[in-house]
Image: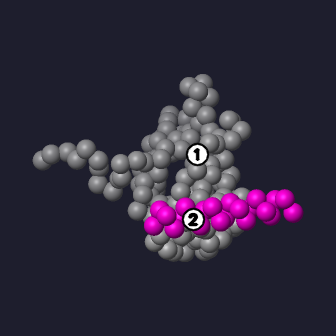
Amino acid sequence: MSVKSIPSGYHTITPHLVCRDAKKAIEFYQKAFGAESLRILSMPDGKVMHAELKIGNSVVMLGEEAPDWKVLSPLSLGNSPVTIHLFTDDVDSLFQRAVSAGCIATMPVSDQFWGDRYGQVVDPFGHRWSIATHKEDLSPEEIQKRGIIAMEQMSKARKQ
């Protein structure tokens, strides 16, 4: 029997999050995003060394922050330059579920020029999430045209 280079149920790219208090993070992602726990490996002190969660059809890995090893969470760094993008059938419901679970809404859900209904949150562990439902299939030219119009409208609104 041959071994698959990409295990069943995984995709080519899999995010791996570092969390301060990974046990609480697992519980939170279950509550906020309906995550299913696939695997949890614990360290001798009981902290999470490695966990794998399934959100929708994708796997997210996570582990405990380890400052001695320079493995730091966004909370220790003071920010995260990464946004995890999550597609769903009902962005409004999932966005509200995430906020009710403890995420901070940083961009309310609205229809976007690129054809998605989209919003952003930050979870209690410092990770940013964008949540979207794809609503329109647009050509690159249509997106470009709408994007220019959207930027012009935002520029005008800022000047007022």
Outermost right residue:
160
Tell me where residue 11 appears, x and y as whole percent.
Answer: 36, 52
Is 156 inside the magenta-drawn segment? yes
**Which quarter of the picture shows residue 47?**
top right
Q: Is residue 142 left or right of residue 28?
A: left
Residue at (67, 54) in percent of width and height: 122
Tell me where residue 140 appears, x and y as whole percent.
Answer: 47, 62
Front one among 134 and 77: 134
Res. 95 visible in picture: no
What's under tag 1, amino acid-wise? Val
Tell me where residue 104 appears, x and y as whole percent.
Answer: 72, 58
Magenta span: chief secondary structure: helix
Residue 129 lies, with reference to residue 116, above or below; the image says: above
Say whether disc 2 or disc 1 marks the residue closer to the N-terminus.
1
Q: Which mark is residue 82?
A: 1
**Which quarter of the picture shows residue 132?**
bottom right
Residue at (54, 44) in percent of width and height: 17
Disc 2 and disc 1 in contact, CB within 8 angstroms: no
**Structural distance between the alpha carbons of marks 2 and 1:** 27 Å
Q: Is residue 106 left or right of residue 146?
A: right
Q: Is residue 10 left or right of residue 148?
A: left
- Residue range in magenta is 139-160
Name the secondary structure under disc 1: loop
Residue at (55, 35) in percent of width and height: 45
What's under tag 2, amino acid-wise? Lys
Res. 80 visible in picture: yes
Q: How is the image coloured?
A: one colour
Q: Which residue is mark 2?
A: 145
Front one among 116 and 17: 116
**Which quarter of the picture shows residue 148?**
bottom right
Nearer the observer: mark 2 or 1; the answer is 2
